């Protein structure tokens, strides 16, 4: 059995069908290429074959793309000279696709050749679109759920099997840029409008339509193989083309801050490729693709953002317990978080009982879902019927008796131990001890809160991030006595609402907040020291953090920072290390600058709440010193503040899986995604250098940068996190 098979019908049309064995959607691997190549050779050589259709044996889809597991490991398996090995491998791929495109034509006269059509029953992504782009005409079934596009950029690579060169030549740099640079996906009608595919036909007519075209004696020479071809919108030296590339270059650097190698390489491949003939352009594309694959950032991004994220979503750390799918969830507290949790649950088709102390508050929480659906309707992403159905799943009430059929409770009331204890007791009086009880606390230890429960084994933390509907991560926290069924329930719930879970053990601030707080604190500490606030913020962004630390504390609110600081100081006593930070934070709070919510914080805001720039008077209170640190020092302080906390969380057993540490960091607080996460970053820079840098930072700035024992040990032994701790590697 092979992934590709071919059958020639009575009319002389060879139908090559892609049907990856053992997968619900086709994915390409090296063997697949070899097989496809052989079938194309065979069809081109067979006089009985007049034309070819390439299609899929999977209902509703053509292909999901390359097998990214293979791409992530390509460098390691490319031999002693990996760049050469990779380049040769990529060029071999180009060879197959170019053969499809030329289809046996005479290289000089463009005469002869056999028409080859792609017939896409549905979704066609990555290589699943690059193959059709090499064909002479692309037909797609009118399947509005299908997604068509080249999303490679989102996992740290770019379309490297000719998709970049072909799409840029087909649509021009301007037309291709959202598809290539943002990985924008379209449904078939949208893909046709964008000029990516040629025809959309009813699903049942797909093969017939492709066949009719193949047999119609069509012209099959690609525009770029014709004499006098001009790139739409102009080549870089054409005045219009020049403007496009200047704009695209600025846009890419503005969006990526220069830290994503793939975006820059993609642009270079398009720019340089536009200046030369097509076959040379493919070689240039292959060189840049090799360059990206050689960059450790791309394999780290693929590993965290695709392979490990998916493994966690599929339950890599789920205990062995029967299916715990949630049928009805009780959400207690209909405030900002509770309203969001009710929304995402109802969107997943789960019945919700949304409780607050007052009916008005419960209704207000439910209205969040109504507003969300209204926005969706305005953007044509939802319908009135869908809104009615989703709202029909939410029962907003003050009546705890309504909870009796719930199989999961998520409590999101005030962050106060006694309020939470009272609510826990009230809920359990109705649900009994078998119902799993989860708290959404962001700071209170789960083991402590579990004391109010009558069944600590069924008590767990399910920590959502704000805003719930946008944030992809959910942190599941096990208290000391939390049992396997509760963990399985939390994981199955997170899977139902299509978010990514990490499972951590109970400790102050769990995992995400434990790492974010030192990041914010390091930024504020630098303000106190006289480091220019603009340098602090820009250094963070230039190293790939989505928000500088000062902007982040404005967003999460300064009074929350004050509250957390006070509680931490009370818990730690004399060991509390952040007095200097508090001086600035408390002063800001005293000025009523509470962050975005008060339209005043480290940044200034206009009346409508739009951020204007850093607040001028901050430097009147904390003057900028004459001597400013260099950019890398500021960046290292900000990164190590987070990364060392992640290492300590692993040492302490809060994290038990570095994959969760990396995926959680990127999805939870946007930790420099180009790096693949804190552990991947340490592997990129190497433990010996990391330890040495920590020693220097400790000497200059204090003990918070002290090299953790684990990192020291790894530095001494030359270990890498993903060799020493990779659970997927052990499982494989
Ligand atoms: P919020 O103040 O917006 O909402 C709390 C809601 O709980 C209010 O509507 C209140 O009326 C209700 N409530 C209080 N006591 C109640 C009781 N006894 N019975 C029923 N309802 C009661 O707060 P929030 O921001 O939604 O936070 C809720 C929880 O989520 C807290 O534990 C918080 O630490 C945690 N959390 C917050 C965030 C965040 O960014 N805001 C993020 C993660 C976790």
Image: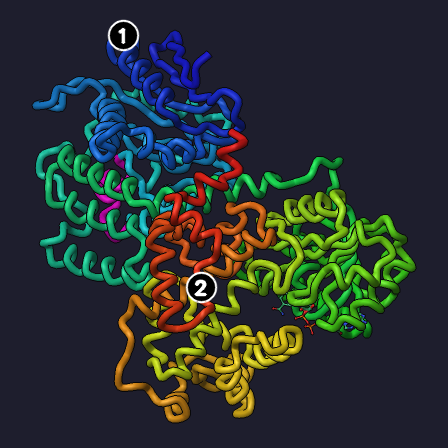
Contact? badges 2 and 1 (CB < 8 Å): no
Considering the whole magenta stretch, tell me its main secondary structure.
helix
Question: Label 1 CB, ligand 1: below 8 Å?
Answer: no
Dot 1 falls on a residue whose secondary structure is loop
Residue placed most toward the observer, 552 or 196: 552
Does the magenta portion include 529? no
Residue placed most toward the observer, 375 or 460: 460
In the rendered image, the vertical position of residue 671 relative to residue 321, given as above or below: below
Is residue 481 found left or right of 207 in the rendered image?
right
Instruction: From the image, state whether disc 2 or disc 1 is nearer to you.
Output: 2
Is residue 573 found left or right of 221 in the rendered image?
right
Q: Position of residue 517 (x, y in %)?
A: 52, 69
| Residue 706 tag number | 2
| Quadrant in the rendering for residue 218 | top left
Figure quarter occupied by ligand 1: bottom right
Does the magenta portion include 165? yes
Label 2 and label 1: CA atoms lie apart by 70 Å
Q: Position of residue 526 (x, y in %)?
A: 40, 78
Is residue 315 found left or right of 73 in the rendered image?
right
Question: Label 2 CB, ligand 1: below 8 Å?
Answer: no
Residue placed most toward the observer, 407 or 132: 407
Q: Residue at coordinates 44% horizontally, 31% vertically from top-left?
A: 63
In the rendered image, the vertical position of residue 157 relative to residue 586, given as above or below: above
Q: Residue at coordinates 62% horizontally, 52% vertically from top-left?
A: 504
**How many C-alpha atoms fall within 10 Å of the one at disc 2: few (<14), some, or many (≥20)?**
some
Q: Residue at coordinates 54% horizontally, 52% vertically from top-left?
A: 650
Residues rendered magenta in the picture: 162-175
The residue beneath circle 1 is: 46
């Amino acid at each position: 059995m092979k992934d590709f098979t071919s059958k020639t019908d009575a009319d002389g049309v060879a139908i090559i069908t892609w049907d990856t064995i053992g997968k619900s959607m086709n994915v390409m691997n090296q063997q697949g290429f070899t097989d496809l190549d052989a079938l194309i050779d065979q069809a081109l050589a067979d006089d009985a074959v007049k034309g070819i259709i390439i299609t899929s044996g999977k209902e509703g889809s053509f292909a999901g793309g390359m097998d990214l597991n293979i791409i992530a490991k390509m460098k390691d398996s490319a031999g002693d000279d990996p760049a050469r090995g990779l380049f040769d491998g990529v060029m071999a791929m180009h060879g197959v696709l170019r053969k499809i495109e030329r289809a046996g034509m005479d290289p000089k006269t463009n005469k002869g050749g056999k028409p080859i059509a792609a017939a896409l029953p549905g979704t066609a992504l990555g290589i699943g679109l690059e193959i059709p782009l090499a064909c002479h005409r692309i037909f797609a079934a009118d399947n509005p759920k299908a997604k068509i596009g080249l999303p490679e950029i989102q996992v740290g690579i770019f379309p490297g099997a000719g998709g970049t060169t072909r799409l840029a030549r087909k649509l021009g740099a301007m037309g291709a840029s959202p598809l290539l640079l943002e990985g924008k996906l379209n449904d078939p009608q949208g893909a046709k409008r964008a000029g990516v595919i040629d025809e959309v036909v009813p699903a049942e007519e797909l093969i017939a339509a492709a066949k009719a075209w193949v047999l119609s004696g069509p012209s099959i020479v690609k525009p770029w193989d014709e004499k006098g071809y001009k790139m739409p919108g102009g080549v870089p030296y054409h005045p219009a083309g020049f403007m496009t590339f200047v704009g695209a270059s600025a846009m890419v650097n503005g969006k990526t801050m220069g830290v994503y190698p793939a975006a820059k390489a993609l642009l270079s491949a398009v720019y340089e490729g536009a200046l030369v003939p097509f076959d040379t352009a493919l070689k240039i594309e292959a060189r840049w693709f090799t360059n990206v694959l050689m960059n450790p950032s791309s394999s780290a991004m693929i590993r965290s953002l695709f392979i490990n994220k998916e493994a966690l979503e599929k339950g890599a750390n789920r205990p062995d317990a029967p299916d715990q799918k949630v049928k009805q969830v009780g959400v207690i507290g209909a405030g900002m978080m509770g309203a969001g949790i009710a929304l995402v649950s109802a969107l997943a088709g789960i019945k919700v009982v949304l409780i607050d102390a007052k009916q008005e508050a419960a209704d207000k929480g439910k209205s969040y879902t109504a507003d969300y659906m209204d926005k969706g309707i305005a953007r044509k992403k939802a319908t009135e019927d869908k809104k009615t159905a989703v709202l029909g799943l939410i029962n907003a009430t003050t009546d705890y008796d309504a909870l009796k059929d719930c199989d999961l409770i998520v409590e999101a009331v005030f962050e106060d131990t006694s309020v939470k204890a009272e609510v826990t007791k009230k809920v359990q009086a109705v649900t009994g001890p078998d119902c799993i009880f989860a708290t959404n606390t962001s700071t209170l230890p789960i083991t402590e809160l579990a004391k109010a429960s009558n069944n600590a084994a069924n008590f767990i933390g399910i920590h959502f991030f704000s805003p719930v509907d946008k944030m992809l991560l959910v942190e599941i926290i096990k208290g000391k006595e939390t049992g396997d069924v509760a963990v399985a329930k939390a994981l199955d719930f997170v899977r139902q609402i299509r978010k990514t879970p990490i499972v951590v053990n109970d400790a102050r601030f769990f995992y995400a907040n434990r790492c974010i707080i030192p990041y914010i604190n390091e930024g504020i500490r630098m303000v106190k020291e006289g480091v220019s606030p603009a340098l602090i913020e820009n250094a963070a962004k230039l190293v790939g953090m989505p928000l500088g630390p000062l902007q982040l504390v404005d967003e999460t609110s300064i009074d929350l920072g004050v509250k957390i600081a006070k509680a931490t100081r009370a818990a730690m006593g004399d060991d509390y290390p952040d007095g200097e930070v508090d001086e600035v934070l408390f002063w800001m709070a005293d000025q009523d600058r509470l962050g975005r919510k008060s339209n005043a914080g480290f940044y200034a805001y206009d009346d409508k709440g739009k951020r204007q720039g850093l607040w001028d008077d901050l430097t009147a209170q904390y003057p900028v010193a004459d001597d400013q640190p260099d950019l890398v020092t500021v960046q290292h302080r900000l990164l190590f503040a987070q990364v060392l906390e992640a290492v300590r969380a692993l040492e302490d057993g809060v994290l038990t899986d570095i994959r969760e540490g990396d995926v959680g960091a990127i999805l939870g607080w946007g930790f420099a995604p180009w790096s693949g996460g804190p552990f991947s970053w340490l592997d990129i820079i190497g433990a010996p250098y990391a330890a040495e840098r920590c020693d220097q930072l400790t000497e200059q700035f204090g003990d918070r940068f002290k090299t953790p024992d684990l990192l020291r040990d790894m530095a001494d032994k030359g270990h890498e996190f993903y060799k020493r701790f990779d659970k997927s590697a052990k499982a494989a």
